[in-house]
Image: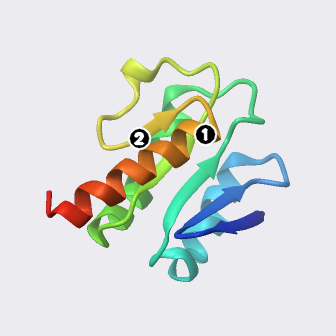
Amino acid sequence: MKVEHKGHTVTIKDTQGNLESFLEKLTHEYKTFEKENMIIDLSHYLELNVKQINSFKDLAKAHKAHKKSFVLVANGVDFNSVSDKLTVVPSQLEAHDLIDLDEIERDLGF
């Protein structure tokens, strides 16, 4: 697992190539990241299905309860069929932009 901090956001990438064990490790180490916005970069997985993306739903729900953003970066996914509880974008740039917008909304009290 590769972790990069940038301002108020942490970007986490899987380095082992096993999505199931990555999610398990991420869940286990969640307390370390719960106070930061999170970007989970899955862009190096070439074939992700909706079920695999939706497996992050519980973690996203817990994170959003702390009033922090949780964004998945994934390529080649039908974004319309992903759970509405998840925020999925095709690039890290869009993920950072979305988190910036979320921060502005929270600052304004929305």
> In front: mark 1 or mark 2?
1
- Image spot of residue 34 (x, y percent): 46, 76
The image shows residue 42 at horizontal and vertical percentages of: 67, 41
**Which badge, 1 or 2, comes first in the chain's sequence?**
2
- Residue in view at x 40 percent, y 56 percent: 60
Q: Residue at image x 60%, y 52%?
A: 40
Left or right: residue 24 versus residue 4 is: left
Splitting the image into 4 quarters, where does residue 94 fall? top right
At horizontal 52% and vertical 60% (from top left) the residue drawn is: 38
Q: Nearer the viewer, residue 55 or 31?
A: 31
Of all residues, the one furthest to the bottom in this rendering is 31
The spot of residue 84 in percent (x, y) is 29, 35
SS for callout 1: helix
- Above or below — where is 99 with respect to 84? below
Q: Tell me the amino acid under the disc marked 2.
A: Thr
The image quadrant where one finds the N terminus is: bottom right
- Identify which amino acid the numbered label 1 is placed on: Leu
- Check disc 2: other Cα within 10 Å, few if <14, some if 14-19, many if 20+: some
How many badges with numbers are in the image? 2
Residue 109 horizontal/vertical position (percent): 14, 64
Residue at (31%, 43%) from the top-left corner?
85
Q: Is residue 35 above or below residue 59?
A: below
Distance between the alpha carbons at the discs numbered 1 and 2: 14 Å
Q: What residue is pinned by disc 2?
A: 87
Nearer the observer, 21 or 66: 66
Q: Which mark is residue 93?
A: 1
Are circles 1 and 2 on residues that touch, CB within 8 Å?
Answer: no
